[in-house]
Image (cartoon, helix red, strand yellow):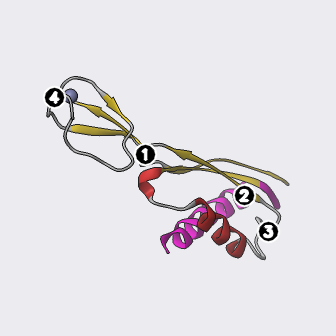
Amino acid sequence: MHEFSLVESMIGLVRESAAENGITRVSVVKLVVGRLVMAQPELLRFSFDVLKEKTVLEGASLEIEERPVMMRCRGCGNSLYPEYVEFICPSCGETLEVITGKELYIEHYEGDS
Ligand SMILES: [Zn+2]
């Protein structure tokens, strides 16, 4: 379950940042996750609830924004929203590049000092 290690490093980053900024209680963490990261939101939430115990994030809630996969053709500029990565444009046969879907970052977090 790679969600657990994703959340572990995310919590690590928030804890570091909170310590640097004198924040003693984090209330919300907002995470942006692309579909290609293959992380299930319910597993992210579960991991978050387990890992936040006894940290500055203990009372925090997790908001997750999922980003769809968007690909664009290098040839004709066609945009596609496939379920998974595809490599060849169905219209012209040129190669496709991933525009969105690989995101994984903390958009912001809120807390009190
Ligand atoms: Zn094309």
Label 1 to label 2, Cα distance in Å?
28 Å
Is the C terminus in the top left, top right, bottom left or bottom right quadrant? bottom right
Front residue of 76/4: it is: 76
Q: Is residue 23 visible from the viewing direction of this image?
A: no
* Dot placed on the residue nearer the N-terminal end, 1 or 4: 4
Q: Position of residue 48 (x, y in %)?
A: 67, 67
**Residue drawn at x 76%, y 75% as measured from the top left:** 53
Task: Please state if 20 lies on the left or on the right of 23 as rendered.
Answer: left
**Residue drawn at x 50%, y 75% as measured from the top left:** 1
Quadrant location of residue 89? Answer: top left
The quadrant of the rendered image in which ligand 1 is seen is: top left
Front residue of 38/90: it is: 90
Question: Outermost residue, front direction?
Answer: 90
Residue topped by disc 2:
18
Residue topped by disc 1:
101
Kind of residue sitting beneath label 3: Glu
Label 1 to label 4, Cα distance in Å?
23 Å
Quadrant location of residue 87? Answer: top left
Residue bounds of the magenta highlight: 1-27
Helix, strand or loop for the magenta stretch, by majority: helix
Crowding around mark 1 (Cα neighbors within 10 Å: few <14, some 14 to 19, many 20+) is: many
